[in-house]
Each structure stands twice: as C-alpha cells, then as structure tokens.
Image: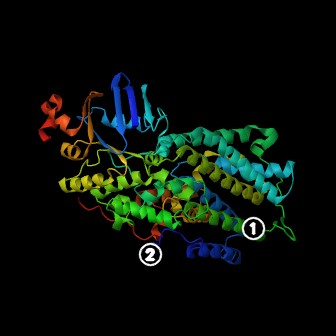
Amino acid sequence: MRSGHTVPTLTPVMIAVWAAFATVPLWIEHVGLYQYLGVEVLIFATYALAYNLVLGHSGLPSFGHGAFFGLGAYGFGLAQLNLVPDLWFCLGAAVATASAGGTLVAAFISHRRGIYYSLLTIAFGQVFWFIAIKWHTVTGGEDGLLKIERLPVQLGVATVDLSHNVSLFYFVLAIFVVVSLLLWRLVHSPFGRILRAIKQNETRARFVGYDVWRYKAAVLILSAGLSGLAGGLFAMAQASAFPDVMSLHYSGYIVMMTLVGGGLVTFWGPVLGAIVFLLARDVIGAFTTGWMLWFGMLFVALVIYKPEGLGGMFLRPARTKRPEAT
Amino acid sequence: MALFEAHELHLRFGDRVVLEDISLSFEVGRLSGIMGPNGAGKTTCFNVLTGRYRPDRGRVVFDGADITGRSPQAISRLGIARSFQLMNLFDEFTAFENVAIALPETRRRGADPIGQAYRDSALVGEAHEILVNVGLGDRAGQIAKSLPYGERRALEIAVALASRPKLLFLDEPTAGLGSDGRARLADLVRKLKGAVTLVVIEHDMEFLFSLADVISVIHWGQVIAQGSPADLRANPWVRNSNLGKLA
C-alpha cells in the first residue's frame, strides 16, 4: 500500500513528447517552416534539459552555460579536423571537453550559492568566450571553425548518412530520447533527490550528513557534459563552430527558454521553452527583426503573471494545503 | 563515561566574546539540559558543538575522538544529529521524503544517478516507522510546508532521528508552541530518552526540569551552574533569576 515512492521509467507524457517529435519531419514543411528548424529545436531542447538539471533541479543559477555548449561545439570540431573524423569519437570529445570545462568551473564555485554563484558563472562564461575569440590558432577566432562535416553514423553493420536534415533530425531525436530518459531517471534517483534537498535547504542537507560541495560540483560537471553534447550536435548541424554561442547573450537564451517553458516546476518545461523560443524567433522574426523585443515582453509578462512558466499551466493546482492553526 | 565532551571552548565574533571557557560533558543515555537567558550563547554553543562554527580555542571530543573544527557533514556521519531553533526542513518535500532523504541508506546510495530513490521497502518502512514514532504516522504524504506548526516541530526531530544518531541535540524544541503542543513534545522527548543520548536547549523551565537528568546554565557565554534539577532549584542564581520562579 505504500506506493507512490517510485516513479515509472516511461511515462505517457514522455512517450507523447517523443512521438510528437518523431512526426515533425512529416508536416513541418507543410506549415511553412523548414526541416532544419526541427533539428535546431531538438538540439536546444536537449541543451535546455541539461541546463535545467542545474537551474531547476538543483537551484544553481548558472548564467554562463553557453561556455559549455560552445566547448562542446569546439571539441567536436577540433576532434574531427585534427584527430579522428568519427562521429562517436567526436561526440565523445564534445562531452569530454565540456565536462573538463565544467570541472574547472565547479572547482571554483561549488562552495557558493545564489547571486554569488550566478556572478561567478557569468565571469567564467566570459573567460571561455574570450578565449574562443582570441585563440585564433586553435578556435579560428571570430571566424570560427569552418568545414565541420556531418559525419555518418557507424552502427557496425550499417552506416547512416546525416547530410540530410531529416536523417540528422532522427539522429538528434535518438540522442534526445536517450538524454531525456537518463535525466528523467536521474531526477528520481538518490542523487537527484539529494540535489533537490540541497536546493531547498543546503544547511539542513549538510547537517544530515551530505557533502554538499561534491553534489553541487558533480551536477555542474554532468550538466556541462550534456550541454557539450548538444553543442557538438549543433556544430555538426551548422557545419561550423562560432564563439557567439558562448557569449552572455546565448547563455541568457537558454535561461529564458528554461524559465519560459517552466523548468522550475516541470521536467518537460525546458523542451516546451526551446520550442516556443525558436518558433518565436522564426515566426515573429519573419515580421520584424526586433522579435526579441516581443519575446522579451512575453518573458516579462510570464515572470509577472505566471512565474512557473508555460509548463506550469499544465500542472494541477499545487498540492499544498493551507497551514492550519496550531 | 562521557559520550561527548567540550573543553574550554572560546569563540568570539569580532570584538564580542560569545563563548568564554565553556566546558560541558554529556553522559550516555542521559538527557542533559542547557538553559540560560536570551543571547547567553546557547545556540552558538550548539553551533560549535555540531560543526557549524569552529571555536577559536578549546576541544570537542565525541566517543573518544577529537572532532573540533570538523565539518557538519562529517560530524553528522559520526552519529550526532541536531534540530534547529528556527524551522529547518526540506519544505517542498513530503514528510516522508524529509525523513527518507536523511536516512543513511539514501546517503550511501548518493552517487547513484539511475536507480529509484525510494524503492527499497526496508528504507520506506524505516522512514514510516520514524514518522509514527514522532506522531506523524498519518502525515507521510503531506508537503512539509503545509503541516501545522507543532507537526513541523515534530518533523524537525524526525529528520534528526533519521540519521540514527548516538547523540541528538535539540535546540528549543518547544519554541513557538502552545501548552498543548509543548505537552505533546515533552511526551515525545520522554519517549526518546534512553533510546538516544539527548542534549536539549530550552527556555521552558517546566519542560526541562521535568525531563532533564542534569542541567547546565549558560550566561554571558559561560557555564555558571551545573547539576541535577534539584541542585539547581537550590542554586542562588537560578532562584534569583526569572527562571527560578518557575522551578
């Protein structure tokens, strides 16, 4: 009878999200959009889920996450151009580069929280961005890394070419499925619940025996690695890697996607946020170059009237009762 | 044998001496009380004993080992738990999860990022048992924030008990409770007595005098009197103070 303490691995919402994405290439051109947008949405949805591990689940306001996304993009590009042009190897390099960056940052900031944490992540984000711009010999400076190829997927017996946006879409979807499944398991695992506890009350977590520093460091490294994976996919999709994804701007976008979508209250919120953000960019952007003005106003309105974000609208009313008098 | 000893603790914040030469010892199985007026340094003393602050001088010894200056998490793992004067819960968690997260089994599995957190029926059972123990058996599924004040107090103690402490520090467990709530909490503390060594800071003298085996009075950062409740009733300082009127 003591049920309700375990969470199913597969949920109806999860399968619906995956299935809905799987149909995208069938209709996206019929509604006046284009296949590449689907790829972009999935990459940013993966990135936003990885980011929300830090922001929503652990309450760590990282505002420099673009650095990890960018490190992944450069890691992918450099591994391909200088080492081995193999897809799995290059994606591994993307994850490794971003995780290494995450480790370095985590070592310096994991004893902080709140605004100090934010400021330090901004500072580190700027450092990485600046290095990407200035270290011409490696990163190509502001010109970026060009001629990154969409490597074929080697699956032992078969090889799948990804040069088409539709095949790339399904490849990215496969990665999204794996990442979202792993993150879903993670947030309900001991590690994930402990992060939740630390988010609510760091002091109490410490006094029940948790080494809070380690958990905060671990989650940042993990989130950085997965953001790097998304960055690697992005480099492949774009066939290039540029420093601008590491800028404060881009780091802000991922925060906006996550918050607008409702990452603070729902697991799938960041995915919704990524969809809304990129659609707004293209749809409002078709009418005005100042689309960010309108999106920004939506953001402000949400923060004022629906701080839980769009995802919060789908939730049942909060489960809490009013405290009774004692 | 004393389970826990503090030797000549000194602590200052800036130019203000908060603890001056505090020596305390707590015996196994006893309930030791700490009393004293507001601002006397009782909570600060707890904070030093449980690792929140590092003393400027002095030693803290638990179970024969010097634990001075160790981190709160290290001290907690040795078997010292505490509750807080101001409520300190995982507010968004249910009562069940507040306790379950504090169980050593959950902590031991802390590096597992894939498995279900509360699948193990022994763990779930133990969390429920602790809740029943503190009188919250039917509140398991309630969000901590939404519990009435007195029950939050009890949950505070449940979370501390979850780490299966050898020594439990309770910082003003009855703070903010009405007389009913106090009576219920006194029952709970009485029940815990014997099962775990207790150290209780309390303002409510009736509460302390009826439960404690030995009481230390702290004032101006010093231990000014120590003894059984009967000894203290005879103590001139206690008699002359407000505290003595109740005793």
Q: Chain of mark 1?
A: A
Tell me: residue B169, above or below residue B186: above
The residue to which callout 1 is attached is: A171
Kindly tell me whether residue B138 is visible in this rendering. yes
Residue A102 locus on image (x, y percent) = 65, 46
The residue depicted at 33 percent of the width and 61 percent of the height is B146
On the rendered structure, is A248 left or right of A139?
left
Within 10 Å of disc 2 (Cα), the crowding (few <14, some 14-19, many 20+) is few
Residue B199 locus on image (x, y percent) = 33, 42
Residue A1 is labelled as 2
Q: Quadrant of residue B15?
A: top left
Residue B177 locus on image (x, y percent) = 23, 52
How far apart are the alpha carbons under marks 2 and 1? 42 Å
A325 or A23: nearer the viewer = A325
A186 or A99: nearer the viewer = A186
Q: Quadrant of residue A124?
A: top right
